[in-house]
Amino acid sequence: MALPVHANTQTVDEYAERMQLYKKVEAVTQIPWYYFAAIDQYERNVRHVRKDIPKAPGHVEIYFRPEVWAGLLNPNPNDESPTTIQFFNGLGVDGNGDGRASATNDEDVIHAFANYLLSYGVDHDNLKIGLWNYYHRDKTVGIITGYARIFKHFGRIDLENKHAFPVPLRSNHSYKNTWGDARGWGGRRIHEGTDIFADYGVPVRATSYGIVEMKGWNRFGGWRIGIRDINNNYHYFAHLSGFAKDVRVGQIVEPGMLIGGVGSSGYGPPGTSGKFPPHLHYGIYKDNGYTEWSFDPYPHLRLWERQERQNIKKGR
């Protein structure tokens, strides 16, 4: 079964409320709003794929474990008194001025994380240090700072629902569900993706808003690109004939942006090509804050293809 790319049910008003809150905290702390948006987005993604974290009670989905919020030695893990929380070195604060530090209140939660970050500073390098000391994971810090760059670049946070099919719909292409099939090339393993067969050089496009995390040669995948989207999905494009001009690691992309061409590269040293018919290997991987795994992209490809055809008919 395919894991949903994102079970997003947010409305325009909810996006606006979140943005208003991020900018409100920015005005108080001088920490740019897009860092709060990025942290909240990362935690939102993690919550959606983890069973050990409770469902968020509000619009902000940053989660503090009770012992972190109230203080490790606090005998009351549900304490909402700012005074005793501070006494036990908890991170909880009263952000909305109601006299309570509630881990279920959006303003209290985001002010608590802002207050934590302020202990390190407001510039990018010190914020990265604060994030690492909180999450203790380089990959998480990289993902959050990548999200921050994306939100800053586009100036908005409602970037979750637009996608593009990896190759132009007018191209002669075909694909079927091959995720999980056995593969013999490179040793016995399962196929972690969907093969889209198309003519050599057919344009390959980014499928979502995201940031290029990886570009280069892989013995099995040939010329390939990896893009992390804001829903914490890692999109893997392999066997390319080459890369689009100026595509680089760290580049921000949007749906439909040219990133390369269909090819038959791989299974050998750099430059090896032609050992199989031209096709795009397209895979998606999900990160849950601890590890990353492959899931079936086929249902999402069918959905994005259908949506793009509908948009073309509507003239969008």
Image (spheres, rainbow, N blue to C red):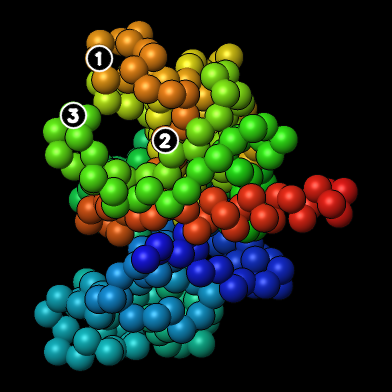
SS class, disc 3: loop
Mark 1 is on which residue type?
Gly
Look at the numbered discs 1 and 3 and tell me whether their residues touch, using CB distance below 8 Å.
no
Residue 130 left/right relative to 307: left
Q: Is residue 172 left or right of residue 283?
A: right
- Specify which label sits upstream in the sequence, 2 or 1: 1
Left or right for 202, reference 292? right
Q: Amino acid at mark 2?
A: His
Identify the secondary structure beneath mark 2.
Answer: strand
Q: CA distance from mark 2 to mark 3?
A: 15 Å
Q: Which residue is mark 2?
A: 281
Picture coordinates of residue 185, whole percent (x, y): 22, 30
**Residue placed at 39% from the left, 14% from the top?**
274
Residue at x-position 29% and y-position 52%: 180
Q: CA distance from mark 2 to mark 1?
A: 16 Å
The image shows residue 43, relative to residue 137, as above or below, that is: below
- The residue at 57%/18% (across/down) is 201
Seen from the viewer's position, the closer of residues 152 and 171 is 171
Residue 120 in view here: no
Q: Name which residue lies at 25% across and 14% down.
A: 268
* Residue hosting label 3: 186
* Residue 55 placement, left or right of 77: right
Q: Which residue is mark 1?
A: 268
Which of disc 3 and disc 1 is earlier in sequence?
3
